[in-house]
Structures are given as C-alpha cells and as structure tokens.
Image (spheres, rainbow, N blue to C red):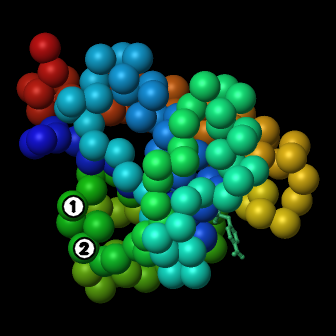
Amino acid sequence: MNHAIKVLFVCLGNICRSPTAEGVFQQMLENAGLADAVKVDSCGTADWHTGKSPDERTIAAAAKRGVALEHLQARQFRAEDLTEFDFVLAMDRSNLDILHGAWSSAGGTEPELFLNYAPRQALEEVPDPYYGGEEGFEHVLDLIEDAGLGLLQAVRQKLEVTGACG
Ligand code: 4NP
C-alpha cells in the first residue's frame, strides 16, 4: 500500500503509550475512511521490549474502549524513521530529546510532542503509566483520544494540500 501520509508515535518502551496511540489513531482513521491513505506505526527509544506485545494493562485498558492492541509488537526507533514518516510524535520531552538528537544528525521530519495536538490540555507530556496503577492507563487513553482528534484534523489538512484526498 502506498500511503500518502505516515505517522509514527514514539515512547520509551513501546509497550504502553505509543502502541495505545497507534491503536486509537488507527481506529480514528478507519472511522474517518482514511485508513488507506495513512500509515500508522509506533516504536520506543529503548530496545528492552523488542518483539513483545503491549503491556497487559495497556491491552486491557484499550480493550475497554473497543481498541485491540494485542497484535502489536514492540520495536526500537531508528534514524531512518525520520525519513520515512511525515509526523514523528513523542509522548514526552525525554524521548523528544532523543529523537531531536537523531534528527540533528540524520535530518528528515522534525519530531514534536504529540500533545501539541491537544491544545486544551494543560499537560505537555503523556505521563509514563508503567510504574503506576490502572488509572494511569485510563489517563493515557484520555490524553491520546484528545490529541488524536487534533492530529486527525492536521492529517486531513495535509491530505488536502497534497491532493491525495477525495
Ligand atoms: P512506555 O512505558 O514508554 O509508555 O512503553 C514504559 C514501558 C516500559 C518501561 C518504562 C516505560 N520499562 O522500564 O521497562
């Protein structure tokens, strides 16, 4: 499939926040009829969980909102992602710093914070839920759903500009 736009979500382990964003945004695209035009992927800046499914708590929280994540497999970020993807969206500043380091030598798409697309949120970062309780995973989903709607608008605009839509 030749996708007009490619979106990459990045966190630390690629088992909690970024796979949640991948699954939620994929579903938003499907609901909007844009799944063929937009490719979505996620990765982690660390390689600790490469090849693993998302965290069980991540899978359970997303399933409650009708989003299936168990088929996803963690992978590590690579500098070539900055050339392949049109949106590179970090969940927090520490991961953004790592991506910026790669971008300053490799070039490509400049990474940004995902919550830039949720301007009504007071938070700038999606908090890491790994060491916390269940409510942290719900909060991650709330933030991702909000930013996902803003991102969908930005993706629509880009599709219109590139003439790839309708
Ligand atoms: P994520 O959360 O970056 O949202 O996937 C984490 C997952 C695993 C670890 C830390 C954060 N860890 O320390 O293994």
Within 10 Å of disc 2 (Cα), the crowding (few <14, some 14-19, many 20+) is: few
Question: Residue 80, labelled with which disc?
Answer: 2
Quadrant hosting residue 42: bottom left
Question: Residue 122: x, y in percent?
Answer: 76, 41
| Residue type (three-letter) at the residue carrying disc 2 | Glu
| Residue 16 against residue 50 in the figure, above or below | above
Residue drawn where x is 54% and y is 44% of the image: 69
Task: Kindly identify which residue carries mark 1.
Answer: 84
Q: Depth check: 165 or 120 in front?
A: 165
Q: Is residue 110 left or right of residue 119?
A: left
Quadrant for the N terminus in the image: top left
Q: Is residue 152 left or right of residue 15?
A: left
Judged from the image, the quadrant occupied by ligand 1 is: bottom right
Mark 1 in CB contact with mark 2 (< 8 angstroms): yes
Residue drawn where x is 77% and y is 63% of the image: 130
**Disc 1 within 8 angstroms of ligand 1 (CB):** no
| Any part of residue 62 in sight | yes
Secondary structure under tag 1 reads helix
Question: Residue 110: x, y in percent?
Answer: 35, 63
**Disc 2 within 8 angstroms of ligand 1 (CB):** no
Secondary structure under tag 2 reads loop
What whole-number distance in Å separates the C-alpha atoms at marks 1 and 2? 6 Å
| Any part of residue 143 in sight | no
Question: Residue 63: x, y in percent?
Answer: 65, 33
| Residue type (three-letter) at the residue carrying disc 1 | Glu
Question: Residue 80: x, y in percent?
Answer: 24, 73
| Residue 61 against residue 157 in the figure, above or below | below
Residue drawn where x is 9% and y is 26% of the image: 163
